[in-house]
């Protein structure tokens, strides 16, 4: 097998392009047990995702999990699947198209595409296509606001594996995280304010629950900054909304297995708030820039049932940022700040330059 992927004959003076690549976790190709099993096998085989000794984990994964979980998960995916496909894929594809337009309006001549760490379109295939189109500079923008080794780092691992197969490598830059980016925080705050405008302002018997995806507790003990970055995002969002500590709660969802995960757990938090008889709970998922199974099914459906069954009164889910203009503007600012120094600006139109010169001369003559 060749060590490197085939390359076209290098030609001096060939035009070069810049690309921005959005990266998200991934999704099954269909809401079926077969498709979910294939997706989970790839996802859960990643040593960044599950840090259990490989031989033991191989037995657990193939002997138990992949025999039981795909059918149950497929039913959950089916409950949120759209006519266009997986909600996550639909939103990320739309985000990439909008970002391309917003960057273009800002004067940046760049390609914008998206890839999934697991499933399709894969990172390797998308990078190969961008390279074939002439992109010699690629900015990686993982859609994970808070850095974690099991999300951001594994996306970079996939890029590194692709680079090992490339003879003529492109220049690569990356966005590590944006947990405290002002545009991101303000977009979240604006979505909550709009929610309040529609459903009424909070009362004393109210809680804004900020649910982030969970990780095993040992990741924090081993130096992963994810827990801290989630709390920072939550604190900044609460400050932007003017909420006191008694009116918001940061928690972690999607616990898997018997090991201890980051706490407090979202399910236990919702149950506890329900038992307190709170008048209303609003739930937002700041770590998910696009709605997906974990938000639409686990939080909007299961979370509501847990809260109401425990005695809570009113439960409202606040959608993810998805295609909000303020969120795409924040993405544009984030990408543009990392594109600095690369030749992405459109060449000025000669007619516009001449008009500017005439205006400058006119201003000079009148002064």
Image (cartoon, rainbow, N blue to C red):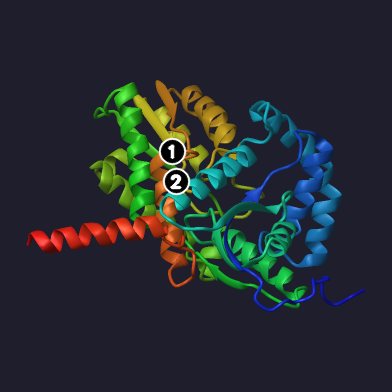
Residue 344 position within the rendered picture, expressed as x and y whole percent measured from the top left: 49, 64
Query: Does 63 sit left or right of 53 as displayed?
Result: right
Splitting the image into 4 quarters, where does residue 167 fall? Answer: bottom right
Residue 238 position within the rendered picture, expressed as x and y whole percent measured from the top left: 30, 45
Q: Which residue corresponds to the image point at 17% horizontal and 58% vertical from the top-left?
A: 362
Give the secondary structure at mark 2: helix
Q: Which residue corresponds to the image point at 30% horizontal and 56% vertical from the top-left?
A: 355
Residue 178 position within the rendered picture, expressed as x and y whole percent measured from the top left: 43, 58
Give the secondary structure at mark 1: loop
Residue 126 visible, this angle = yes
Instruction: Tell me if label 2 and label 1 are in contact, CB under 8 Å.
Output: yes
Question: Vertical placement of 204 versus 225: above or below?
Answer: above
Question: Vertical placement of 216 versus 213: above or below?
Answer: below
Nearer-the-camera pick, 109 or 305 = 109
Query: Which residue is label 2 attached to?
Result: 328
Q: Which residue corresponds to the image point at 14% horizontal and 59% vertical from the top-left?
A: 363
Query: Does 112 sit left or right of 79 as displayed?
Result: left
Q: How many marks?
A: 2
Packing grade of label 2 (10 A; few <14, some 14-19, many >=20) is many
Nearer-the-camera pick, 285 or 346 = 346
Q: Which residue corresponds to the image point at 49% horizontal and 70% vertical from the top-left?
A: 342
Query: Does 53 sit left or right of 238 as displayed?
Result: right
Question: Vertical placement of 364 versus 194: above or below?
Answer: below
Nearer-the-camera pick, 142 or 303 = 142
Q: Which residue ends up furthest to the left in the rendered image?
A: 367
Nearer-the-camera pick, 18 or 44 = 18
Q: CA distance from mark 2 to mark 1?
A: 6 Å
Query: Which residue is label 1 attached to?
Result: 324
Q: Which mark, residue 169?
A: none
């Amino acid at each position: 097998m060749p060590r490197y992927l085939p390359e076209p004959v290098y030609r001096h003076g060939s035009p070069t392009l810049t690309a921005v690549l959005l990266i998200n976790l991934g999704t099954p190709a269909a809401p079926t047990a077969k498709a979910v099993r294939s997706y989970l096998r790839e996802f859960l085989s990643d040593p960044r995702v599950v840090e259990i000794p490989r031989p033991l984990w191989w037995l657990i994964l193939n002997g138990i999990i992949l025999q039981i979980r795909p059918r149950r998960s497929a039913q959950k995916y089916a409950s949120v699947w759209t006519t266009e496909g997986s909600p996550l894929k639909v939103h990320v594809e739309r985000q990439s198209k909008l970002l391309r337009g917003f960057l273009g309006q800002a004067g940046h001549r760049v390609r914008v595409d998206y890839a999934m760490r697991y499933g399709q379109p894969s990172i390797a295939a998308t990078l190969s296509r961008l390279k074939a189109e002439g992109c010699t500079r690629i900015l990686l923008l993982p859609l994970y606001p808070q850095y974690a080794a099991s999300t951001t780092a594994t996306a970079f691992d996939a890029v590194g594996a692709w680079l090992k197969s490339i003879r003529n490598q492109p220049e690569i830059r990356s966005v590590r995280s944006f947990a405290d980016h002002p545009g991101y925080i303000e977009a979240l705050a604006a979505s909550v304010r709009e929610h309040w405008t529609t459903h009424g302002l909070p009362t004393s018997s109210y809680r804004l629950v900020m649910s982030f995806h969970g990780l095993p507790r040992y990741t924090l003990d081993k130096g992963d900054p994810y827990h801290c970055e989630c709390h920072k995002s939550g604190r900044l969002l609460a400050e932007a909304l003017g909420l006191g500590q008694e009116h918001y709660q940061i928690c972690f969802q999607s616990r898997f297995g018997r090991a201890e995960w980051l706490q407090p757990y979202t399910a236990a938090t919702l149950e506890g708030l329900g038992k307190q008889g709170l008048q209303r709970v609003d739930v937002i998922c700041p770590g998910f820039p696009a709605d997906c199974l974990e938000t639409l099914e686990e939080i909007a459906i299961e979370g509501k049932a847990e809260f109401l069954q425990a005695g809570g009164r009113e439960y409202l889910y606040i959608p993810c940022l998805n295609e909000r203009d303020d969120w795409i503007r924040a993405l544009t600012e984030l990408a543009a700040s990392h594109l600095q120094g690369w030749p992405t600006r459109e060449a000025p139109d000669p007619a516009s330059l001449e008009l500017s010169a005439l205006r400058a001369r006119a201003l000079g003559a009148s002064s």
